[in-house]
Amino acid sequence: MITTRSNQKLCKNRAGFTLLEVVMVMLVVIIISGMTIPMVVRIAQNIRTGGDARDLNGAILVAKMRASSDYAQARLHVNLDANSFWVEVEPAGSTTWTTEGGVQYLSKNVTFGYGSLSSPPSGTQTTLAQATACSGFSNSACIIFNSRGIPVDITNSPYGNYAIYVTDGKSVSGVTVSVTGVTSIWRTDASSASWIAR
């Protein structure tokens, strides 16, 4: 078989990538990975605290609806030690709270709190704080609704200073309840109180 010079050149051009080309591609992949991995981790953290805030908001709205539909008092009961929460109802004429539904827990590495932040979301609370403790329970927080679905304090007076906050140390999410019963979900980085409504 006779090979011509052009056939030999064609075979040489099909040899593959040089070591320099492979190293350059690997460097580009490493640089892009180094930039995106921290962003992905941060997004995952925000999803956890944001998801827990949405779960809390849902439970607050269930308590509000149960109060007005059953003509009873209802509350969101938060156990700050166990990182859990649930809805309770106190029927008219009764003095005992009955748990409805199940107990919900916060995501892994998420706790109730707001870290070192000192200012609440704009137009919500006067002072940044978790909701007041449930009567008879230490290290708890309660958001209580009367039979009309209006948030009230333990004296049954309308109250618009309720909030529950969760944090993973990097971000803080919270749910606030206005005096009319409107809830809002908020988020900020744990390092500074630049609250953004969700």
Image (cartoon, rainbow, N blue to C red):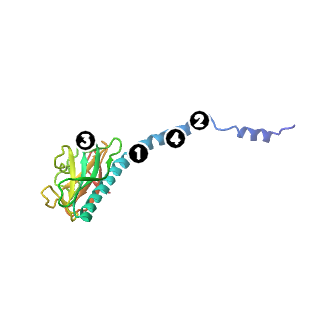
Type of residue at label 1? Answer: Met
**Alpha carbon of mark 1 to alpha carbon of mark 2: how far?**
30 Å
* The N terminus - image quarter: top right
Of labels 3 and 1, earlier in sequence is 1
Return the residue at label 1. Answer: 39
Residue at 61 percent across and 34 percent down: it is: 19
Q: Amino acid at mark 2?
A: Leu
In space, the residues marked 3 and 4 are separated at their CA atoms by 44 Å
Where disc 1 sits, the SS reads helix
Specify few, some or many for label 2: CA neighbours under 10 Å numbering under 14, 14-19, or 20 or more.
few
Picture disc at residue 81: 3
Look at the numbered discs 4 and 2 and tell me whether their residues touch, using CB distance below 8 Å. Answer: no
SS at mark 2? Answer: helix
Q: Which residue is mark 4?
A: 29
Please provide percent x and percent y for residue 196: 29, 55
Most foreground residue, 72 or 7? 72
- Residue 156 on image: x %, y %: 14, 59
Please, what secondary structure does the residue beneath circle 3 have?
A: loop
Question: Nearest the camera: 97 or 149?
Answer: 97
- Residue found at the far left of this picture: 155
Q: Please state which of the two labelled residues, at mark 1 or mark 2, is closer to the viewer.
A: 1
Q: Answer yes or no: do the residues labelled 3 and 1 have beta carbons within 8 Å?
A: no
Q: Mark 3 Cα within 10 Å, few/some/many (few <14, many 20+)?
A: few
- Give the Cα separation between the discs numbered 2 and 3: 57 Å
Q: In this image, 45 relative to 90: left or right? A: right
Q: Residue at x 28, y 62 (%)?
A: 65
